[in-house]
Amino acid sequence: MQISANEFKDLISGYEKVLYLCHRNADPDAVGSGFSLQEAFGGDLAAVEGVSRTASALLRAIGSDIQIDPSFEEYDLVVVVDTAVRLQVGDLNLNDYAVVDHHQDRDLVETALFYIQRPADSTAEIVWEILMKSGSRPSQKAALALLVGIITDTGRFKHARASSFRTVSEILEKCEIEYAEALDVLSRIPTETSRRIAALKAASRAEIEWTDDWVVVSSEVSAFEGSSAMTLVEIGADVALVGGVHNRKCRISGRARRAAVLAGLDLAAIMGEVARAHQGDGGGHRGAAALEVSGPANELLTECRKKVMEALVGPRQA
Ligand SMILES: [Mn+2]
């Protein structure tokens, strides 16, 4: 059941023990959203497997703890935040659960007790709306957490729409915090050597395919597929697909330039299609998506790259 932001408070208060659950390798949008909802309506905060480096910097800044892989038995309701597809919460057996999310996948919401899902730039933006419609007053910590979520999910406003700027300005006004505080949290992230090495290896192993209009790149690394794909896009690819093997499963992250998305590319659809063909899971956004399946990385990458090339038939406009 899809609900509106002003119905959330009434519904959630019908449950005694609530767990706000963030996806695997939870990012600041997930953690910030879960934290703010938990602060406003009570409950616990948890993530599957762990949190990202940026999210742990955020948790340190707001002095909050997060449970990793808790058991669900003691909870009456699990609210899954910022999670598009089931693979992001692993093989967890969710019974009574709700969803608050800004992706457009139907996977999780279909069997949710209730959900709020709309295509915002971040889940934090939706959570802010829930808080405002419920008449709650977020603390400065919650405000900071939501801000960092918005900043990171919009790629530091590179893909932000007007509503993200509006939400940020409301947060700054209502919660009396400085934008610079959010930037401080982000600048504390150490530039890990391992991440830089992964990006450099991705570049040196890249298989490059191009037409007059488009450059599509695929590569393999052993970690940091997502940020490596982003680096490949930054240095010239229109679309980058980077695969790696984790626990005998192949994980592929894809990133695309806006021009490719405007030309009709939908990475989420391609990842979903390839994943389903191999009995796996995949999805995300049109310009940033991932999949996880069993199979050889090089073959899966070739399959994805082929579909990307097929999708990019038109000339680039931007
Ligand atoms: Mn998000």
Image: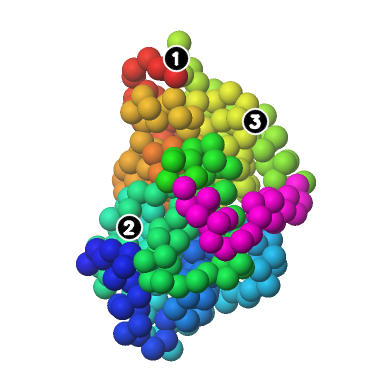
The residue lying at 52 percent from left, 76 percent from top is 39
Marks 2 and 1, how far apart at CA = 35 Å
- Please tell me which of labels 2 and 1 falls first in the chain: 2
The residue lying at 26 percent from left, 73 percent from top is 113
Q: Can you identify the residue that label 1 sits on?
A: 213
**Residue nearest the observer in this picture, 259 or 180:** 180
Residue 134: in magenta span? no
- The amino acid type found where label 3 is placed reads Ala
* Tag of residue 203: 3
Of the two numbered discs 3 and 1 in the rendering, the one whose residue sits closer to the viewer: 1
Rendered location of residue 190, percent (x, y): 76, 51
Rendered location of residue 189, percent (x, y): 73, 53
Of the two numbered discs 2 and 1 in the rendering, the one whose residue sits closer to the viewer: 2
* Tag of residue 117: 2
Residue 185 is drawn in which quadrant? bottom right
The residue lying at 57 percent from left, 76 percent from top is 67
The residue lying at 50 percent from left, 71 percent from top is 137
